Image (spheres, grey):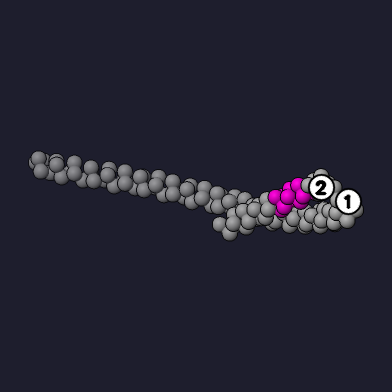
């Protein structure tokens, strides 16, 4: 055997070894990609459930906020009614100041409720 034949045989053996290595590496890469696809599918399913729960919670918060706003409006109307009755019965400024303070408080609470509603609507739209 000549040196050229020996080198050719070594080259063929090296090429076969390289081909086997590439085949094994491609199988490992394929398995890794399949695992990532499976994990991505699991994460997507869980995210869908979380988003559904978040949407239901957001709807409940909207209903609660609307109900609270309705109740505050009723309280505010009651306070205005009481204030009107008191102003007819008495001219005492201290009672009117107290009623005015309560009215201001209810107005602030109503504004807070509207702010929470706006935040929730903005959050839902994003």
Kind of element beneath mark 2: helix
Residue that mark 1 sits on? 90
Q: Is residue 41 left or right of residue 7?
A: right
Q: How many C-alpha atoms fall within 10 Å of the one at disc 1: few (<14), some, or many (≥20)?
A: few
For the record, the magenta segment spans 99-110
Q: Is residue 29 left or right of residue 5?
A: right
- Relative image position of residue 82 (x, y in whole percent): 86, 53
Q: Nearer the viewer, residue 96 or 105?
A: 96
Q: CA distance from mark 1 to mark 2?
A: 9 Å
Q: Residue at x 64, y 53 (%)?
A: 115
Q: Is residue 69 left or right of residue 117?
A: right
Can residue 78 be seen at all in this image of the molecule?
Answer: no
- Relative image position of residue 2 (x, y in whole percent): 9, 41
Q: What numbered label is drawn on residue 39?
A: none
- Relative image position of residue 28 (x, y in whole percent): 40, 45
- Relative image position of residue 31 (x, y in whole percent): 44, 47
Q: What numbered label is drawn on residue 93?
A: 2
Q: Nearer the viewer, residue 61 or 77?
A: 77
Q: Is residue 21 left or right of residue 54?
A: left
């Amino acid at each position: 055997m000549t040196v050229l034949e020996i080198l050719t045989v070594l080259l063929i053996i090296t090429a076969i070894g390289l081909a086997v290595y590439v085949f094994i590496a491609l199988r490992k890469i394929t398995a890794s990609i399949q695992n990532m696809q499976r994990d991505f599918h699991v994460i997507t399913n869980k995210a869908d459930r979380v988003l559904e729960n978040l949407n239901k919670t957001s709807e409940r918060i909207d209903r609660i906020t609307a109900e609270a706003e309705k109740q505050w409006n009723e309280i505010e109307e009651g306070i205005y009614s009481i204030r009107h009755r008191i102003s007819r019965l008495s001219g005492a400024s201290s009672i009117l100041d107290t009623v005015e303070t309560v009215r201001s408080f209810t107005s602030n609470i109503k504004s807070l409720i509207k702010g929470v509603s706006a935040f929730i609507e903005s959050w839902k739209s994003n």
